[in-house]
Image: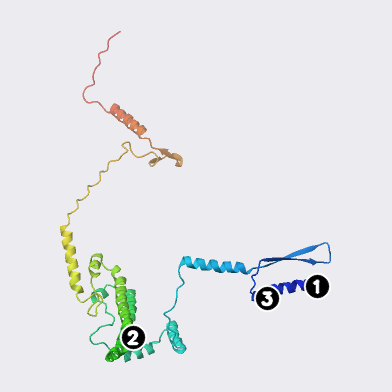
Amino acid sequence: MAKKRILLEKLINLLGDSDEVDKPRKRRVIDSDSDTDNESQTKRKRIIVPSDSEEENNESMSSNVLQLLGEEPKHENILEIHIDVANIWNNIVTNGLDKESKDKINKKIPTLKNCDVTAPNLNSEILATLSASAKTRDERLREKQNQIGYIIANLNCVLKSLLVKNDSNKEEIEKISDSLRLLCDLQFMESETRRAVILPGLNKSIKNSLEKCKASDGLLFGKNLSETIKESKSIERSSRDLKKASEKPNAPINNPLNSWGPSTSSKRKPHQGGQYQHYHPRHSSQRAHRSAMTQAQNRPMRGKPRQWNRKKD
């Protein structure tokens, strides 16, 4: 019994170490008998060893699927920076920059004289119509735009020093120029975001006119906003005058469809004993007719009564 177990373990070890051999492996099923105290009872163990051909099929299947899905993306344009620099940037991206450090950096950056890249201010006409939460939201977006403006101004300082050297730094000039163009486009997108957040809360007739206004002269809706609003109101009044007055609808005629009266299920009269008696229009008209006949009979006759000549028998 012990010898069989030792041989079985050696066989399993040999099969496990066969990965190092270049010979192809096949799927093997090993049956072993383990004798218990009762020799009449036997237990069979099946050991399945995966073959190399199955692994190759899995690898080829995955490659075929990848070919159907498309080529594997190639990351050729990769830049590896210094590990210390990478740690600094990762820390700022994760935790942000404290206010003191930001103010210190912003004080170093000069203001561009002939190019306004700062965040446009909100027009006073629009500011008066916004709620407190809307004003706070717009102020947060404006602070982000101001920081973008500082970056644009600082990169222009680097670009100016490179342009002095003419053609000696073409590659650096191109990279700085590409970065500045993307940042200027980002500044435009932020202005459009601020406008898109504000416009839905304004009057519909004025909103259509304000959508055409561009951010200019340091104002989010331009410097001619008041004139644009006046023109919009004038156009609205003119359009109302030109519209044909709609006819007043005729008053509805209260003509009940049920000439006999209300339905029997909706109108009931109380009856003695707390019960309800159904209302029957036909019976009520008959009662009214009998009442009128009784009153006519009991009414005193005017003048002399007629004398009827009766024939004597």
SS for callout 3: helix
* Residue 302 in the image, given as x and y percentages of width and height: 22, 26
Rendering quarter of residue 94: bottom left
Discs 3, 2 touching: Cβ within 8 Å: no
* Residue 288 in the image, given as x and y percentages of width and height: 32, 32
Q: Quadrant of the N terminus?
A: bottom right
The residue positioned 75% from the left and 71% from the top of the image is 8
Q: Earlier in the sequence, mark 1 or mark 2?
A: 1
* Residue 182 in the image, given as x and y percentages of width and height: 32, 79
Asked if 19 appears above or below 277 in the picture, the reply is below
Determine crowd level at label 1: few under 14, some 14-19, many 20+ residues with C-alpha closer than 10 A.
few
Q: Quadrant of the C terminus?
A: top left
The circle drawn on residue 3 is 1
Any part of residue 185 in sight: yes
Looking at the rendered structure, the kind of residue marked 3 is Asp
Rendering quarter of residue 181: bottom left
Closer to us: mark 1 or mark 3? 3
Looking at the rendered structure, the kind of residue marked 2 is Glu
* Residue 295 in the image, given as x and y percentages of width and height: 30, 30
The residue positioned 17% from the left and 64% from the top of the image is 235
Residue at label 3?
17
The circle drawn on residue 171 is 2
CA–CA distance in space, label 1 to label 3: 21 Å
The residue positioned 17% from the left and 72% from the top of the image is 227
Direction top: furthest residue? 313
Q: Earlier in the sequence, mark 1 or mark 3?
A: 1
Q: Earlier in the sequence, mark 3 or mark 2?
A: 3
SS for callout 1: helix
Discs 1, 3 touching: Cβ within 8 Å: no
| Direction from residue 289 to residue 5 in the image, left or right | right
Q: How many marks?
A: 3
Looking at the rendered structure, the kind of residue marked 1 is Lys
